[in-house]
Image (cartoon, grey):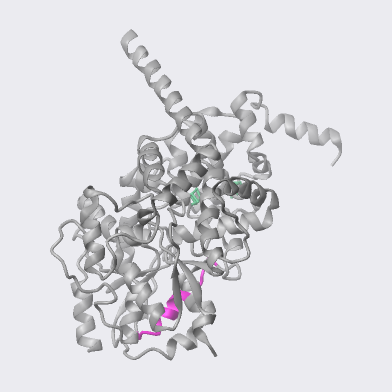
């Protein structure tokens, strides 16, 4: 392809890309979406799109054209990561991976849903499990384990306090804790703005 | 042939099986023991971490915690083995990505060094079904069958991440119409029946269950309606999270979509090794099929009594 044509395509498809967030889309590799031919196979086979307003093709396309509103939309959290779109895309675009990347950017920008935030910070970071069974509140799960001939707690982080520390240290080291603090801050600021708007009304 | 040495795995428990559905953990342990495979404990293992949530929050964190989990198995010189599609998705994708992108492995090891660990990547993470089908093989399993069902109609639920992404799975790229799980199920004399959208997702994954339970329950509703329509006696699955969704989620679908479904759903949900173990002649107590407690609010939420009746009539 000649340089001219290459430039022409870039300019037209990425016309929205000049903001900070749109640049993030590019950095995350979402540009592979440019080979999308809009065939709709991804949307057509999507089990989530069958029952919600979520449209795979449209979510990806919004990101590609630099439309930031895709990050605050609940739609990107409705993908069950079944990987049908990833498998069936005739252009070999790893669609599901792209959605996961969009979610990463959404979290960075503070668009993390409350149940997810609490799962990450109050459960996973504290216990090392996403679904824990330790502590008095979880006594029944320990009893259930015993009733099936297992020790009350599994040989995981639950019986190795030093392992929980390892997990926490890694999460700090890789920037997870910082990311969550920042997400909480951005979320808080946004909520305040909304409150003010309400007051003005 | 020394099978004990041949089939040694590090049993990666994950979260849902040990902490909510321990009957699944028991049955995997019992069946592997029966087959002469050794399961070593992965002491101090954490959440895989769950691909739909933690990977979606921050890919590098997901990769590093996954690498730490795999490294615990590496220290024992064995492949991590999981009975969960979600854990499989995480461990296998993380392993695959680090094998293909050396800079990721390097980045991961820089962090792991801080806690005195190292990720090597020389041992492939495996699913319980992969160990049964590819390591041991269908003939070896057949040799252990003692009892056969005469008339049991099974709706097999593969789930998503045991098959996909297919380029990172061991099934030769097959994801539209695989048969390995049906073959194992049919060893027991049961019939794997066809039903509409058999390979459809249960609805739990991708952070959807955590975020919007009604959407999850609607996936499950559709799945269960198709299964009931086809006349299945039970559902067989190979993932504790699918299992939770098809069992607890079955109750939720019965509530939320009461007006849509007619009769409430009541299809028992059984994990593969529970069924297989019965056919091998393993004590149902060891397979987590007999309730020995008076706890409330614990699974199975959908009674498995109708299934145990069939077991009594046909196997004993
Ligand atoms: S299936 Fe692939 S090419 Fe078709 S619309 Fe979706 S992303 Fe584009
Ligand atoms: S992976 Fe997500 S977007 Fe793709 S088909 Fe499945 S639910 Fe839809």
Residue B205 place in picture, x, y as percent: 41, 52
Residue at position x 56%, y 64% from top?
B74
Q: Residue furthest right?
A: A2
User: Nearest the camera: A77 or A144?
Assistant: A144
The quarter in which the C terminus of chain B is drawn is: bottom left
Is residue B182 covered in magenta?
Answer: yes
Find the magenta span and give its range. Answer: B175-189
Is B202 drawn above or below residue B195 in the view shown?
A: above
Task: Locate the N terminus of chain B by quadrant.
Answer: bottom right
Asked whether B147 or A95 is in front, the reply is: B147
Give the total number of marks visible in the rendering. 0
- Residue B130 position, x and y percent, is 50, 73
Residue at (28% x, 55% y) in the render: B249
Q: Is residue A107 left or right of residue B192?
A: right
Relative to B138, residue B117 above or below: above
Residue B301 in view in this figure: no
- Where residue B151 appears, as percent x and y from the top left, is 28, 84
- Residue B274, by quadrant, is bottom left
Which of the 4 image quadrants contains residue B14?
A: bottom left
Indicate whether residue B165 is drawn in magenta. Answer: no
Left or right: residue A24 versus residue B11 is right
Q: Residue furthest left?
A: B294
Residue at horizontal 53 percent and vertical 54 percent from the top: B68
Q: Position of residue A155 (x, y in %)?
A: 38, 61
Residue at 22% over, 81% down: B310
Q: Look at the image and tell me whether residue B140 can be seen.
A: yes
């Amino acid at each position: 392809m000649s340089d001219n044509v290459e430039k022409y395509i870039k300019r037209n498809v990425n016309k929205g890309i000049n903001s900070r967030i749109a640049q993030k889309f590019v950095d995350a590799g979402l540009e592979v979406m440019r080979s999308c031919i809009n065939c709709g196979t991804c949307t057509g086979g999507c089990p989530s799109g069958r029952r919600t307003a979520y449209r795979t093709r449209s979510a990806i396309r919004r990101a590609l054209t630099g439309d930031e509103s895709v990050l605050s939309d609940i739609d990107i959290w409705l993908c069950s990561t079944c990987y049908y779109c990833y498998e069936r895309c005739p252009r070999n675009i790893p669609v599901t991976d792209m959605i996961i990347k969009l979610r990463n950017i959404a979290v960075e920008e503070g668009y993390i849903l409350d149940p997810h935030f609490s799962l990450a910070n109050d459960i996973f970071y504290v216990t090392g499990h996403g679904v824990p069974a330790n502590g008095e509140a979880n006594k029944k799960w320990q009893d259930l384990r015993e009733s099936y001939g297992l020790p009350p707690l599994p040989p995981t982080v639950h019986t190795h306090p030093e392992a929980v520390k390892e997990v926490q240290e890694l999460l700090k080291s890789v920037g997870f804790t910082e990311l969550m603090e920042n997400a909480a801050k951005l979320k808080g600021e946004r909520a305040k703005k909304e409150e003010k708007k309400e007051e003005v009304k | 042939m020394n099978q004990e040495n041949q089939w040694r795995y590090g049993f990666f428990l994950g979260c849902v099986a040990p902490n909510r559905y321990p009957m699944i953990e028991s049955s995997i342990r019992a069946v592997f023991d029966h087959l002469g495979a050794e399961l070593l404990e992965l002491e101090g293992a954490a959440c895989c971490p769950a691909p739909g949530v933690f990977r979606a929050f921050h890919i590098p964190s997901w990769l590093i915690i996954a690498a730490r989990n795999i490294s615990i198995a590496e220290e024992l010189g064995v492949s991590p083995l999981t009975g969960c599609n979600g854990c499989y998705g995480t461990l296998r994708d993380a392993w695959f990505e680090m094998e293909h992108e050396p800079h990721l492995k390097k980045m991961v090891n820089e962090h792991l060094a801080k806690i005195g660990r190292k990720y090597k990547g020389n041992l492939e993470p495996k699913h319980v079904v992969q160990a049964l089908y590819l390591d041991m093989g269908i003939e070896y399993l057949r040799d252990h069958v003692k009892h056969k069902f005469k008339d049991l109609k099974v709706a097999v639920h593969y789930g998503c991440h045991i098959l996909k992404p297919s380029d990172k799975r061991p099934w030769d790229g097959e994801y539209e119409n695989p048969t390995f799980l049906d073959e194992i199920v049919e060893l027991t004399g049961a019939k794997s029946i066809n039903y509409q959208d058999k390979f459809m997702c249960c609805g739990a994954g991708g952070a959807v269950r955590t975020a919007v339970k009604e959407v999850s329950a609607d996936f499950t509703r559709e799945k269960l309606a198709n299964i009931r329509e086809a006349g299945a006696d039970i559902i067989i699955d190979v993932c504790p999270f699918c299992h939770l969704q098809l069992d607890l989620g079955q109750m939720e679908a019965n509530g939320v979509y009461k007006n849509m479904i007619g009769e409430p759903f009541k299809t028992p949900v059984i994990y593969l090794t529970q069924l297989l173990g019965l056919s091998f002649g393993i004590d149902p107590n060891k397979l987590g099929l007999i309730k020995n407690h008076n706890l409330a609010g614990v699974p199975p939420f959908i009674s498995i009594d109708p299934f145990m009746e069939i077991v009594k009539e046909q196997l004993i």
